[in-house]
Image (cartoon, rainbow, N blue to C red):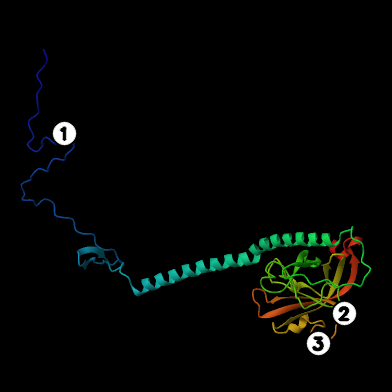
Amino acid sequence: MLPAVTRPPANPHLDATGLMGAVPPAPDTGDGGGGEPPAEPPRPRRGERVVQLRPEQTGEGYRSVYSELTRPTVGSRLRTVVRGTGELLITFGLVVLLFAGYEIWGKAVIVEAHQNDLNSQLAQEWGATADPTVGPTTGPTVKPKPPAKGKPVAGLYIPKFEKHWVVVEGVSPEDIRYAPGHYPDSAMPGEVGNFSVAGHRIRSTFWRLDELKTGDAIVVETRTDWLVYRVYDQRIVKPSQVEVVAPVPGKAGQKATEKLLTLTTCNPKFDNYQRLIIHARLDHTQAKSAGRPAELEA
């Protein structure tokens, strides 16, 4: 026979929700709610300041609460302006650096691609004019017509920089965008006069032209010959001094008696209010059938 189960006496403060985790109400001590006195708010430590929070009243009621420490002040507004200006200047500086990097290095890839194309054009043109099946002419020598604008004229080498370009006809901004350009009214390579060439002051063309010294070699390649020039003068002039590309440099109107080469570019770097001029004089000519000149093999 099972023993009887005894139940504990009913607790008037424990209702049916007690088994579900509800906290039973605290027993009434009968002291009229006196109990322990409420804890006092913490007193500020030395050096601290108590800031009263004030509600901000709007048309929809009290929406936000701000303290005196978080209210905008003249100093905080000034710091915000300075911080925003600094971020703007940093962004602008990065944009300028990226643009400068493109101007200095990025264009080199584009110029090299165009130079390869011009090299191919020049090789095809020289190959066509050097057809061995065509016999030599016995009549008077006819001066060849000048090339069309933008078409390749000759090869230009500066051994000191290990640089090589194809020179095109014309010196307009469009003509010399990817290559040095031949001044149309100046002499052709190897002729008596002043074979004058202009180029941009960028890394892919005449960036280091100011490093040329007296005696340095500049080699021009034509269909049949290598023309080796030697630098004899370097100077800086104003853009209006166009007499530097005259048949006799600096002396407009005089008849040429020498075979000269003149290179022009902007000066200083990253600006164009001056012109850097390099003058060279033909030193010797070597037929291409004899191989490359020693100046290119050094």
Vertical placement of residue 256 versus 270, above or below = below
Q: Earlier in the sequence, mark 3 or mark 2?
A: 3
Q: Which residue is mark 3?
A: 253
Q: Which residue is mark 1?
A: 19
Q: Disc 2 or disc 1, which is closer to the eye?
A: 2
Q: Which residue is mark 2?
A: 258
Task: Identify the residue shown where x is 54% and y is 66%.
Answer: 95
Q: Amino acid at mark 1?
A: Leu
Q: Left or right: 2 with respect to 183?
A: left
What separation in Å lies between label 3 and label 2 (alpha carbons)? Answer: 15 Å
Vertical placement of residue 5 versus 258, above or below = above
Q: Which residue is situated farthest in the right direction here?
A: 138
* Nearer to the camera, 94 or 281: 281
Task: Give the crowd class for mark 1: few <14, some 14-19, many >=20 residues within 10 Å.
Answer: few
Which quadrant holds residue 151? bottom right
Q: In x, y percent, where is residue 26?
A: 12, 43
Q: Left or right: 36 with respect to 199?
A: left
* Nearer to the camera, 83 or 101: 101
Secondary-structure class at tag 2? loop
Quarter of the image with the N terminus is: top left
Q: Amino acid at mark 3?
A: Gly
Task: Identify the residue shown where x is 79% and y is 78%.
Answer: 186
Q: Earlier in the sequence, mark 3 or mark 1?
A: 1
